[in-house]
Amino acid sequence: MSDQSSHQDPGPSRKFLPEVKPLESRLLLSRQVSFPDGVSFRFPTFPSLPRTGGVFEQSGAVLGIGVGQATTNTVQVADEGQGRIQAHWNGGSVHSLTGVQATVIEAHRARSNQITFNLTPLRTGPTALAVGPLVPTDAALASEGRHPLRSLAKRTSGFAVQSASVLTVIVDKRTTNAVEISNSGGGAVEVEWNGGVVHSFTGVATIVVDTQNARKNLVALDDVTH
């Protein structure tokens, strides 16, 4: 009979201890956006958005803004040219950024979003905007004032109206809205929404995008003159 002890060394622990590494950016996904002027970019996107306020992230020359309130979202962007951008959203403070070539705005959850782009300087080169999920703030309505309206018939879940220098684009697709705008400078813009044809406008200083019905929208502004 063996007098070896029945007690055995349990050996090394097999408990799994995962390693946690902080991420440098919240922009983990990306999406290709093509503009009417032929320019295309691969934009980073937010995997999740806060339910109040919003977030932003600048990665190189790309600025991402994400808003995800439950009822309405508003975003205002002033493009001052030469890569200078001022932006604020959902009643928050104004953020001033430099070195920005492309601005991407995502609006989730809410069925009513408004996004406004103020093209401050008169440009001599093209600039592009892409809109999908977006939101603006305190935007002037194209129906206000006594200016004659230039309206395009509703096609592909959207329409556009111009009153003086304000161009309003309204899209109401039920799944995801997307609008692409190319700014050629001097008030000349080309607009495409939800996969439709490209429409040309002149004398535009402010672009207002209203997205309705859909819970996912995307907007991108590409300034190739900076």
Image: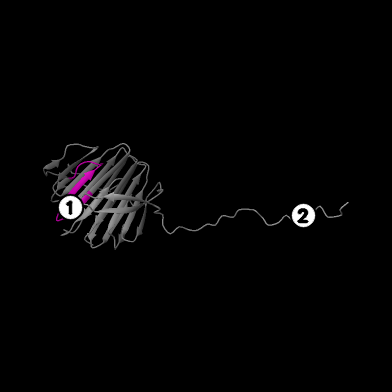
Q: Which element is circle 1 on?
A: loop
Of the pair 180 and 136, the residue shown nearer to us: 180
Q: Residues within 10 Å of mark 2 (few under 14, many from 20)?
A: few
Residue 153, position as x, y percentages in the image = 17, 37
Residue 104, position as x, y percentages in the image = 31, 52
Q: Taken as a whole, is the magenta stretch helix, strand or loop?
A: strand
Say if the magenta span includes residue 132.
Answer: no
Magenta range is 181-198
* Numbered circle sitting on residue 205: 1
Residue 191, position as x, y percentages in the image = 20, 46
Residue 35 appears in the rendering: yes
Determine which residue is flagged by label 2: 8
**Residue at the spot 15% in from the left edge and 50% down from the top edge:** 165
Instruction: Determine whether 3 is above or below 196 in the image.
Output: below
Instruction: Determine whether 108 is above or below 19 in the image.
Output: above
The residue type indicated by label 1 comes to Ala
- Which is nearer the N-term, disc 2 or disc 1? 2
The residue type indicated by label 2 comes to Gln
